[in-house]
Amino acid sequence: VLRALTMTANGAQGETLAQMEKALGLPVGQLSDYLSAYSKSLPSGEKSVFHQANSLWLKEGQVEVEKDFLQKNADYFGAGVFQEPFDNATVQKVNDWVKEHTHGMVPQMLSELSPQSVMVLLNALAFEGEWAEVYEEQDIHEANFTLADGSTKPVDMMSSSEYGCIRDGDAMGFLKYYAGGKYAFAALLPGEGQSPADYAATLTGQRLRELLSNPDERVVWAELPKFETEYSVSLADTLRSLGMTDAFEPDKADFSAMGREVDGWPLYIGQVLHKTYISVFEQGTK
């Protein structure tokens, strides 16, 4: 989402840009430089595969796009550009693009395109990592796992000794590295009587970074359930709560550096969607 919003901010001006930069945390030029360099620095190997892609989809004959906006997003994010009629076939093409660039893990991003839509900006990423030490058959046993609502569920529990202990007050966790040691899985368990949501609300980005950057080298006996889960959310209200309000208002949004509809109507953000999928199993994570 950060990359997609930064791509969008490259077409914003005035108060719309100022609100977006405040919500995103950096001036858009600086953020574009950072994200571009960061993406290029991320390793990808045979057993720890990292892939990401970006694209812009334009409605044929309905939107005039500034060349500088397209060039910035090509230079910073390698964003491909597609012109389509925005019909049902386009919805399928968008979903096929997302499916391809998430390695099949997110097979559908859109169910439809509204008649008002003239542009779609996409960021997709996929990670497939094999554990440095995979779980063997003797490391797996059935156990009851307590869910956030207090109910229990039988799961296949994977047991191991880990050497990266994370402690944050009553919360405890560990790091489990993937092959090659460039990436790690981080798990944190809130203290007794504290829900995951309540604990997450106490974390700041800086605090989480400190926890992950300074693990204790003591040995942790860890049990991790095999699981897979999906999550989707509309982020418009969240972004509004961060002060990014004008971008969603047709009479206030200033995306003049991005372009305009052919009849002269200004562009604005209709919705911001996020979807994710994760699977954690004996061999690794997808």
Image (cartoon, rainbow, N blue to C red):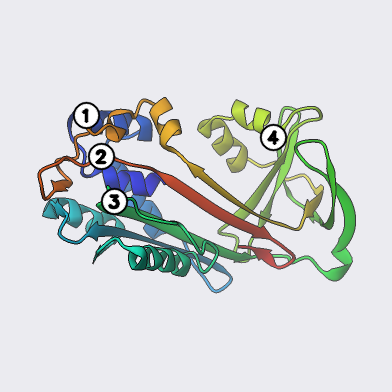
The kind of secondary structure element at disc 4 is helix
Residue position marked by numbered label 1 in the rendering: 252
Q: Are marks 2 and 4 in contact (CB under 8 Å)?
A: no
Mark 2 vs mark 4, CA separation in Å: 35 Å
Where is residue 161? Give x, y as percent.
81, 54
Residue position marked by numbered label 3 in the rendering: 115
Q: Earlier in the sequence, mark 2 or mark 4?
A: 4
Residue position marked by numbered label 4 in the rendering: 196
Q: Are marks 2 and 1 in contact (CB under 8 Å)?
A: yes
In this rendering, position of residue 246 left or right of residue 92: left
Q: Earlier in the sequence, mark 2 or mark 1?
A: 1
Q: Earlier in the sequence, mark 3 or mark 2?
A: 3
When the figure is inspected, residue 164 is found, relative to residue 106, above or below; the finding is: above
Q: Quadrant of residue 40?
A: bottom left
Residue position marked by numbered label 2 in the rendering: 268
Q: Amino acid at mark 4?
A: Pro
Q: Earlier in the sequence, mark 3 or mark 1?
A: 3
In this orientation, does residue 233 appear? yes
Label 1 packing within 10 angstroms: few (<14), some (14-19), many (20+): some
Label 2 packing within 10 angstroms: few (<14), some (14-19), many (20+): many
